[in-house]
Each structure stands twice: as C-alpha cells, then as structure tokens.
Image (cartoon, rainbow, N blue to C red):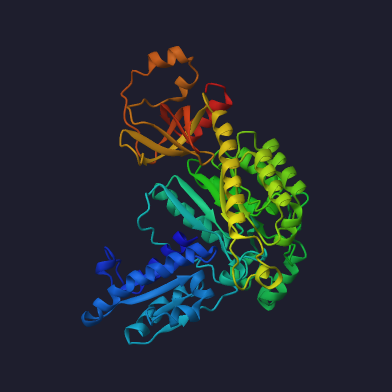
Amino acid sequence: MNVSDTQIAYSIMQAAGYGRAEGVDDADVIFLNTCAIREHAEHKIWSRLGVLKAMKQSKEKSGGLVVGVLGCMAERLKEQILDQEKLVDVVAGPDAYRDLPRLVSKADEGQRVINTMLSQDETYADIAPVRVDDDGISAYVSIGRGCNQHCTYCIVPRTRGIERSRPAASIYEEIRELSRKGYKEVTLLGQNVNSYNDKSHLSGRGGVAGGDEHGLDAISDLELETSKMKELPLVKTAKGFRTVYRTPTAGITFSELIDNIAEIDPEMRIRFTSPHPKDFPDELLEIIRNRPNVCSAIHLPAQSGNSEVLERMRRGYTREAYIELVDRIRSIVGEDVTISSDFISGFCGETEEQHKDTVSLLERVKYDQAFMFAYSMRERTPAHRRYVDDVPEDVKRRRLAEVIDTFHANVKLRNEAQLGKRHLVLVEGNSKRSDKDLAGRNDGNKKVIFPNNPIPTLSQTLMHTNKDKLEMETTMAQQHAKPGEYVVVEVTGTTGISLTGRAIARTTLAEFHQSKLNGSL
C-alpha cells in the first residue's frame, strides 16, 4: 500500500509542476511515507528524521528544505511529529495527498502545516500513478482504501478510515493501460481486498445517467440507489465466518471484479493482498481454479490458532472454521495452492496452551510463507482500551521463535514435495547472488532461481512430443530468457523458502496451461 500511495503522491506533485529529484542531496522536498502497523516501523521513521535534521540545517541558507511525513503514522502521531524539534514542515494523512502541493507551498512560506482529515469517499480513482523505480513487469493497483473490520490489535481503521471500494471502471482502465505497456503481473491492493463491494454504479456518483427518456432525471441519486439496493443479493462469506459490516448487500463483488480483470489480458498474472479469511466464498475459489492467470496463491491471515484469542482479537471466526476453510481451498483450488499467513505471538492474555494452539495450526496447515511478529500494543486500538499487554517481552520472543521454527520446518516439507515438478516462472531479472542465475516467481509466488543458460522456445507442437524427441527437436535457435518472459522450470532443489531448478523452455502463460491440460508437461 505504501508503494502504491507513493506513486499517487508522485503523480499529484508532478501535475503541480514538481520534478523528481535524483537523490536526497538534490531535493527541495523530502517526504517520508509511513506505516503505523507495528512499533518497529515507527521507530525507523524517527531514526530517519534524525538523519534529515542535519541536512535540513545545512540547507537553511540555500533556500531551505521541506520535510514531510505522510501516511498512517502522520495521522496517528500528528501532534508529536510537529513538536519534534520543529523538524517536520508538512504532515499529511492517507486521504490528504491531493493537498500536498498547497501544503508544500505554505511550508515554503515558513508555515508548518497539517492535513490529516479522513475521507468517506476518497479512492484516488482518477489519479494515474507515476510508477517510478518499478521493473516494468509487475505493478500494484489499489482497488480500495480503509477498513471496517476493527480487529482489536489493529490501528488501520483509525489511520486509514472507513472502507471504500474504488469504482470498477477505473480499475479496468488502469489494468488495460498496464497491459498496453507490457506489464505481465498486477497485484490488487486493499486493507481487506476481497471485501471489495462497488456500488458506485447504482447512483450518479458512479456513472448512472442523471436522466433519460423515461424521466429518471426526476429521481434523486439517493432514491435511485435505494431502489436498486432492494434488488441486490447478499454478500457471501466463507462458511463459519461472520461479518461486522452493516450493509450486507452486494454490488460488484471481488469475485466479479477479479473475473472481469482476468479477461483483460490472459497473459497477465493477477494477484491480490491483503484479504480477510471471511471473504472467500466458493465462487471466488472456483475463479482462482478456473482462470489460469489468477494465481493460485492465497494469503490467509490467521493471527492465532486459538479460538479464545481470536475472539479477543475480534477476528470473526474460530480455529475450526479457519481449518475448514483451508481444507476447502485445497479441495477446490488444488493441493498445490500456496497458502501464506500472518501470526501475532503474545497477544493480550495469551496463555502457553493458547500459544501451543498456534504452533499446532502451523503444523496442521503447513504454510508456504508467513509473516510472524511479536505483539506490540498500539495506542487508539480497541485492545489498548480493553486489555492489558500482560505477556512479558522475553516470553513473546521465545514464543515467536517457536512459531518461526515451526514454520520453517514445515515449509521445507512443502518445498521438497515440489522436486521434479515443472512450474511456470515469470522472470524478474538476475539473481541477487549471481548474474549467472535468473530469478523469478512461480504461480504460487515462490521465488525460483535457475541458471541463465540459452533455452529454446517451446511451441505447442513440441508440447505434444515425448521427452527424448523434445530434446532432439530443440535444435532451434536458443536464447537467454529476458525479464518479463515466462519460463518452464523443473524444480531440482530448495533453499529456505525458495526453489532452485533448471530451465526447460520459454513459453507463454496460455501455452503452459494448455500443455498441462493435455498432459504434455
């Protein structure tokens, strides 16, 4: 989300006549885009501000330097940031990026300014992101902002506001433009990305005509929206999960959105993050299974493996419901679907037995990737008001270490099960360790590293030949794979959470999946 927000801020500043500096030493304005999810993230910003202090002082005689703090930390700690040794000139929350040029102008006049107003409808749908420093292969596309879930440990609803779904038409157009530019992968973003529910098309706000020959111009937007709402189906959730949303009717749902996006460019992979487990109805799982370019990689944040802790976290499900959903995902999408998760160790009141339930959940599910943290109390969260952060820090660290060790032991088993299998890898570039190797990601979002040797193109005709004949017929001109190309890689090893392998052929996404269907791979 911060990468996406930075690209929006660049676009707004560029439209106002600002140019991007080559580096901090050349800059007249420096923004720090911040996160407030964890305490450690905020500590890094305070440290960075200390570094900028000397730079700001050295530029005072040469026109000065405007320092701004943007994003969630700006909204959460606005007064403290402005009071911090008079270092910060601009404080702007996540919904105030359109105001950045005005704020910077005021700062140039010597004022210290702030705008952290949260919006009920801002989605920046009309802002074309300036995608600086990306690889031209993968892009983030924000489809919504804010969160209504109000998990007790989480600050996001307070820092990013209520949930808003970006109008679907603007999302489709952005992805069409990315396709025209040759991008091969998009990741849809939202705090609860799969709770997307666009109803903007039901009123004038989303493009319903204000009037027609039938006299609709006499009907107000509110009346039109209300009449349409009566015809809408209810939002579907996964079995055993409850929702906290007050409006249960569905407009354009996430399932419909992602199905339509998949049709835009069959050679473009579609990913999404970060979802909530409750919003995985069967129809979404079936789309993931049936659409070759919708990746079979599902992030399924658990946070805890104990039902009582989950209740205190206000997650809306039990351990049993979560496990049933995992089993359903693997039943519908397939056993090779990769599942990742988030875990918090040492949440308020967590006992040793409850911690062991989390460890046993990791052993039961065998995740392919996990983000694991020790709990840090955040002010202004429900947990800060209701509970006591009563798990000692050394106990948190020990429990977190056990969670991490359990994850790594099981991901090793998952990866070893892939030995000998062939994966479609989207090449990202050279491996970080050696330019003799290429690195990319497979459908399941696992990093795959393989030698950068010349390899052939695998035509549909060759897909039907046996292995011996295939080797004989690949006397065609061989080339090194380039970033943005798809390569069939046979897995030969595993290192940590990554895979290693040997390249078989350059191909296309459609060709690869067709060959799997007809059994030639």
Of 234 and 142, nearer the camera is 142
From the viewer's perspective, is residue 19 above or below residue 317? Answer: below
- Residue 289 on image: x %, y %: 63, 38
For the point 60% across and 34% down, the residue is 336
Instruction: State the residue lying farthest toward the left.
Output: 62
* Relative horizontal placement of residue 333, taking residue 437 as reference (left or right): right
- Residue 24 on image: x %, y %: 29, 66
Of 461 and 114, nearer the camera is 114
From the viewer's perspective, is residue 270 above or below residue 169? Answer: above
From the viewer's perspective, is residue 212 above or below residue 350? Answer: below
* Relative horizontal placement of residue 294, taking residue 349 as reference (left or right): left
Quarter of the view holding residue 328: top right
- Residue 47 on image: x %, y %: 40, 68
Quarter of the view holding residue 486: top left
Residue 235 visible in the picture: no
For the point 74% across and 66% down, the residue is 229
Count of labels shown?
0
* Relative horizontal placement of residue 25, taking residue 503 as reference (left or right): left
For the point 62% across and 70% down, the residue is 162
- Residue 456 on image: x %, y %: 36, 25
For the point 55% across and 46% down, the residue is 262
From the viewer's perspective, is residue 521 above or below residue 177? Answer: above
Residue 108 visible in the picture: yes
